[in-house]
Amino acid sequence: MSNKNNATIATIAEICKQDRIFEIPLYQRLYEWESTEIMELLNDIQKAFDESKNYFIGNITTSIKSEKELNKFVLIDGQQRLTTSMILLKVILDFGDSDEFAGEETQDLRKKYIGK
């Protein structure tokens, strides 16, 4: 396997839509974010939304697991941020599936981020 460093800018939608599988290695710390860190992230996202700006979640560092499985990545850095973002996205989509909020907007979000 080659040792190339490629930096790209991607949205959460692009990361999700590309059928990527992320593996968190055993040497990584456990998910440790508590309400303080989660609220800080949510407030930052809300502020960016209110100002009609994109929100930069930070660097996510990965490595391709093997040449045979190019869609599988080992998550080296950014585990807490990416995991929290995925949980948030799942909650939004589940909330959107409720009868009160089911509609085109929810389906558009699902297609954009889940691909289904």
Image: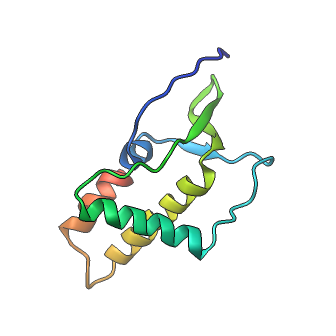
- Depth check: give the residue in front, 78 or 73: 78
The structure residue drawn at horizontal position 58% and vertical position 73%, both measured from the top left corner, is 36
Q: Is residue 88 left or right of residue 3?
A: left
Quadrant showing the N terminus: top right
Give x and y (percent) for residue 114: 39, 54
Q: Residue furthest bottom?
A: 100
Q: How many marks?
A: 0
Give x and y (percent) for residue 84: 54, 62
Give x and y (percent) for residue 71: 54, 34
- Depth check: give the residue in front, 72 or 44: 44
Q: Is residue 30 left or right of residue 3?
A: right
Q: Is residue 11 above or below residue 40?
A: above
The structure residue drawn at horizontal position 64% and vertical position 66%, both measured from the top left corner, is 33
User: To which quarter of the image does residue 34 belong?
Assistant: bottom right
The structure residue drawn at horizontal position 33% and vertical position 64%, both measured from the top left corner, is 47
Quadrant showing the C terminus: bottom left
Give x and y (percent) for residue 60: 55, 42
The structure residue drawn at horizontal position 76% and vertical position 55%, both measured from the top left corner, is 29
- Depth check: give the residue in front, 91 or 7: 7
Q: Is residue 80 left or right of residue 52?
A: right
